[in-house]
Amino acid sequence: MSKNGSISASVIKRLPRYYRFLGELKKQGVERISSRELSERMKLTASQIRQDLNCFGGFGQQGYGYHVDSLHNEIGKILGVDRNFETILIGAGNLGKAIALHINFETRGCHLTGIFDVNPKLTGQRVGDIAIMHTDEIEKFCHEHSPVVAVLCIPKANTQEIADKLVSLGVKAFWNFSHYDLSIDYEGIIVENVHLGDSLLTLTYGANIVISENEDN
Amino acid sequence: MSKNGSISASVIKRLPRYYRFLGELKKQGVERISSRELSERMKLTASQIRQDLNCFGGFGQQGYGYHVDSLHNEIGKILGVDRNFETILIGAGNLGKAIALHINFETRGCHLTGIFDVNPKLTGQRVGDIAIMHTDEIEKFCHEHSPVVAVLCIPKANTQEIADKLVSLGVKAFWNFSHYDLSIDYEGIIVENVHLGDSLLTLTYGANIVISENEDN
């Protein structure tokens, strides 16, 4: 994998989107697509697409375009969609439950097997197929299942402490929904912070610009 | 606002994070902070911070640093946190409900006043203070309330159609959680796509690299 280790972060950020678009084309029965057609659908330039996909040795053929199914599979392999990483979720509040039910972990290389909450009233309640466990059970569960990925849907104040504990128990990757920038001070630990509030503020900024321009006219 | 219209997209993307960090410092009673201290907390370089904040005329004073409260207020004004934009949410499934309950819209310039779902069984059910309305009521509601922001938590297949309708009813900004890249083919319409699945895939990619390196050793 060291070859892929050198792919720029901006290309990596676009890979899931390529994977998603190619998956949709596949579902629609499209067998091949030119970089021009793909660029129109994805609102990227054709040269951007060629450049991005060349990072992986290039799957396109001159005059033929990309073979949708192969390219989808190849990108999927690069992303690790077949890894089936054991995954746990901490914090079974509204957001945690919604993430557990709404996200298809399986198609994204993860397998959600444990959900934990500190509130004893939630213990035993089912979220989909999974019964919520008390956070006291995390250590035992990790020793038995060795989860690689943890989804954090917990309050800001507890995030660093829980993350530290999970790292010591072998967790390698955090999908962090708490309002806390989980620092990546650990060697070899991956963090994806999802700041929904920041995303809404970015939208508010844009709306403010548009509305202010309208008001000025 | 035309002055701010020229701020680069990458700076704008960082503004909500500055706003969040400064808000936390404010809560902790910190009155002023140097770019060096801020850079350590935010894991950005001090020169990056100075460059970003200079876009807005610069609020820092040589040898004094930034006045936390003023900088927080100024960035808040730029972002539009005081706008109180009337906001509706479409799709009251697990994710829609969680977003409605979990996100503090008020502190981000938005005021959630209407929640809609196509399922008549949900009509009248309360999500926090708001009773779910049937999607048939959207038109009437928009005429009466003129919402500016719409949160879309609906299946992919319906997204474009609903967005078209809402644009015709005066909505200017979409916070889109559906698995569909809402195209921005409308003049003066702002879209913030939140692809949670893509975020998870980015994490899986990173975990795959780390785990593969461990396996190689």
Image (cartoon, coloured by chain):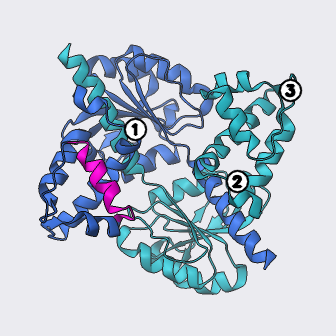
Chain colours: A blue, B cyan
Q: Is residue A214 magenta?
A: no
Q: Amino acid at mark 1?
A: Ala
Vertical relation: A113 (above or below) B29: below
Q: For the image shown, how many numbered marks are present on the structure?
A: 3
Q: What chain does mark 2 sit on?
A: B
- Asked if the residue under mark 3 is in contact with the one under mark 2, i.e. CB atoms within 8 Å, the reply is no
Which residue is label 3 attached to?
Answer: B62
Label 1 residue SS: helix
Vertical relation: B124 (above or below) B139: above
Frontmost residue, B112 versus A45:
A45
Residue interval drawn in magenta: A42-56
From the viewer's perspective, is B156 left or right of A211? left
The circle drawn on residue A9 is 1
Query: The C terminus of chain B appears in which quarter of the rendering?
Result: top left
Frontmost residue, B88 versus A208:
A208
Label 2 residue SS: helix
Decide: few, some or many residues near mark 2? Use Cα within 10 Å; few <14, some 14-19, many ≥20. many
Distance between the alpha carbons at the discs numbered 2 and 1: 29 Å
Where is residue B156, by image quadrant?
Answer: bottom left
Label 3 residue SS: loop
Give the overall secondary structure of the magenta segment: helix
- Asked if the residue under mark 1 is in contact with the one under mark 2, i.e. CB atoms within 8 Å, the reply is no
